[in-house]
Image: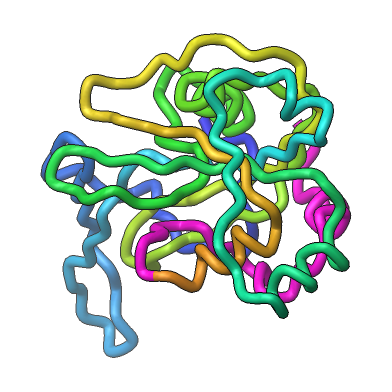
Amino acid sequence: MRKFIPEKVRLIPKEATKVFEGRIYDVYQWPQKLFDGSTETFEMLSRADTVKIIALVNEKELKSLQNIKNEQMVMDDSDQEADNLSCDRRKIIITHQTQPRKDWFYDYPGGRVDAEDESELKAAKRELREETGLVFKNWKLVEVNQPFSKIDWLVYTFVASELAAQTQQELDAGEKIEVLAVSLLELQELAKSEDPQFLRFKGFENVKSINELLNQPELYKY
């Protein structure tokens, strides 16, 4: 059950009928009256919504964590100087992962909203804990987008802060996930490379500090 639906997204109308049910995608059709009075069958796909999480840790929190890669990436002198001047010592948690029939790629923690999840926020907390073993206290919904207008599918992006606990990863059989902590500049450089999948979000290129991430407007209060 979606708790928040932004304006100007295209969803499957209530009168539509499901004509095919797949493991990921379902197909819906409905009769649509046209401007000349004739009727034509319209069609859309549907799939489970997904969540992604931009989780932030400070130096003290990072030192307390186990099995988190915190390697300094190689940058040229100008980039290194900009990194030292523009950001504090907080880091962003991302994943380096592979799945069957996929090469290794960088991404935020995240995944599907399951039928058992009470809300998008519940799904985000579950996915972050399963993929990274991390639990956070503060959560903010900062973006919701519809990747394709022909698919009833929304992607919810959350910012999480204030580490509460670390537990064991609970990975699916089709997942291999390494957890990394990177600076904002390192993240932005990775987002420009060929390896990331979904490291970008609206306005990301203009974010200049961790505080700007934390101060993104909250779209919905869960």
Q: Specify the quadrant that holds the C terminus.
A: top right
Residue ID at (42%, 33%): 178
Q: Which residues are magenta?
A: 194-222
From what the image shows, is residue 9 above or below residue 28?
Answer: below
Question: Where does the image place residue 52, in percent across and percent down from the top left?
Answer: 54, 43
Residue 197 can be seen in this image: yes
Q: Say left or right for 219 vs 150.
A: right
Question: Where does the image place residue 171, in percent across and percent down from the top left?
Answer: 35, 20
Residue 118 can be seen in this image: no
Residue ID at (83%, 59%): 87
Question: Where does the image place residue 185, in percent across and percent down from the top left?
Answer: 68, 64
183 or 154: nearer the viewer: 183
129 or 21: nearer the viewer: 129
Question: Where does the image place residue 155, in percent across and percent down from the top left?
Answer: 50, 50
Q: Say left or right for 93 vs 149.
A: right
* Colour mode of the rendering: rainbow
Most frequent secondary structure within the magenta stretch: loop
